[in-house]
């Protein structure tokens, strides 16, 4: 407004010229505001402005969804409040499938960066926002593209199957993407005599080698949450709860998987807990999934598997950077937004499309 106030407009200036001048200053004002918001995002990972403590965030998010034709997609590891406002909650495969199918104008991705990036790869014309741009992934970080490129060059006759938990740059270096829901089917789609590099999760890779009888070359990456479970503490817990079944995500280490009653993606773990007849479960994955497990099985008991750390929590520090407040902020300001170089996007899309095709043909949904 100050900018506009300082305008000196000579008498008898035609109205059209006056309006044009105001328009110019209006754009300057908007640009200044946007620059300021973008600076806040660069410094904090989100638009760090104060939110009215009296604002009903649940109602405000619903209102923005309608006004902006936005869809909120959330991973099971998000905090319960976020899961409760989501239009769809799923595992990585389900989220990618939903992102591919949506006709919303804005995809609000309550998950981590590689997930929102995948949604953008599949939807270049849609706006994709993430509550906190700093919500990364230790597993994706464990495969820097330059090092992986050199590794790949050492195995020129191998094709690359990458777990979706990786950057767009790694996807662009891959032949097919997989998730924990469809990895076996994806591997089976490759001729048995074709050597494969599997990246970036060595635990999932080792588990898949065992399941499929392949001898995939594994990249040495891992997830900080799934690597931390303590076999010793789990064994003690099982003694105290002899009826409890241990259910685990395949990103866990082999020692934990070896003593598990069921292994699967987050959606598969949830479905198992709904259809299985046991009353008690020890859950070896991020604790966010317990919200849906408990909601759909109110009379069953779910115990988080104990980790080998002093805080005794299995929270993913990346997933848990997102909050309901940041979710509202990213919808309100449409920032932080995921943007991507077009050449990289097209290269990363190819192996994702292959994964989606194989999953469709096999009738797999996340
Ligand atoms: P899924 O939900 O696909 O099983 O993946 C788990 C995970 O670690 C996501 O970051
Ligand atoms: Fe990445 Fe592990 Fe967090 Fe999933 S749980 S986002 S794999 S660090």
Image (tube, rainbow, N blue to C red):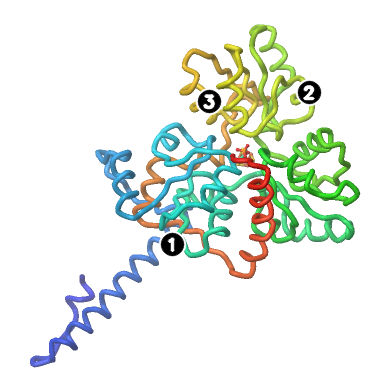
Instruction: Identify the image quadrant of the C terminus.
Output: top right
- Of badges 3 and 1, the one in the foreground is 3
Give the image location of residue 308, x and y in percent. 68, 25
Residue found at x 52% / y 24%: 293
Cα–Cα span, label 1 and label 2: 48 Å
On the image, the x and y values in percent for residue 217 come to 86, 46
Marks 2,3: beta carbons within 8 A? no
Whether ligand 1 has any atom under 8 Å from the Cβ at mark 3 is answered as no
Q: Residues within 10 Å of mark 1 (few under 14, many from 20)?
A: some
Task: Determine the image quadrant of residue 146.
Answer: bottom right
Query: Which quadrant holds the N terminus?
Result: bottom left
Mark carried by residue 300: none
Is the C-beta separation of discs 1 and 2 under 8 Å? Answer: no
Vertical side of 186 occupied by 211: above or below: above
Name the secondary structure under disc 2: helix
88 up-or-down from 3: above or below: above
Helix, strand or loop at mark 3: helix
Q: Which residue is mark 1?
A: 39
What residue would you read off at disc 2?
258
Seen in the image, is 190 located left or right of residue 44?
Answer: right
Task: Looking at the picture, tell me which residue is in the foreground, 219 or 83.
Answer: 83
Instruction: Farthest residue to the left: give it.
Output: 12
């Amino acid at each position: 407004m100050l900018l506009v106030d300082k305008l000196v407009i000579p008498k008898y200036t035609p109205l059209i010229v006056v309006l044009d001048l105001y328009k110019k200053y209006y754009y300057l004002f908007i640009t200044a505001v946007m620059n300021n918001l973008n600076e806040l995002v660069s410094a904090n990972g989100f638009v760090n402005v104060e939110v009215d403590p009296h604002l009903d965030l649940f109602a405000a998010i619903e209102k923005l969804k309608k006004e902006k034709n936005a869809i909120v997609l959330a991973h099971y590891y998000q905090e319960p409040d976020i899961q409760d406002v989501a239009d769809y909650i799923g595992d990585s495969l389900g989220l990618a499938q939903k992102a591919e199918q949506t006709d919303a104008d804005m995809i609000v991705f309550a998950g981590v960066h590689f997930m929102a990036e995948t949604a953008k790869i599949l939807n270049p014309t849609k706006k994709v926002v993430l509550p906190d741009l700093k919500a990364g992934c230790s597993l994706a970080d464990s495969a820097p593209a330059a090092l992986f490129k050199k590794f790949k060059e050492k195995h020129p006759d191998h094709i690359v199957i990458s777990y979706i938990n990786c950057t767009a740059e790694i996807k662009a270096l891959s032949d097919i993407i997989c998730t924990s829901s469809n990895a076996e089917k994806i591997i089976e789609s490759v001729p048995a005599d074709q050597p494969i590099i599997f990246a970036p999760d060595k635990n999932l890779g080792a588990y898949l080698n065992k399941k499929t009888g392949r001898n995939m070359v594994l990249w040495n990456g891992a997830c900080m949450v799934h690597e931390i479970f303590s076999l010793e503490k789990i064994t003690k817990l099982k003694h105290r709860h002899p009826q409890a079944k241990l259910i685990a995500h395949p990103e866990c280490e082999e020692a934990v998987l070896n003593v598990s009653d069921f292994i699967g993606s987050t959606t598969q773990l949830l479905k198992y807990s709904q259809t299985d007849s046991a009353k008690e479960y020890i859950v070896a994955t991020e604790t966010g999934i317990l919200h849906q497990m408990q909601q759909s099985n109110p009379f069953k008991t779910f115990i988080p598997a104990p980790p080998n750390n002093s805080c005794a929590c299995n929270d993913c520090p990346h997933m848990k950077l997102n909050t309901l407040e940041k979710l509202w902020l990213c919808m309100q300001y449409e920032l932080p937004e995921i943007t991507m170089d077009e050449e990289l996007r097209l290269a990363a899309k190819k192996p994702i499309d292959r994964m989606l095709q194989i999953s469709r043909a096999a009738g797999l949904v996340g």
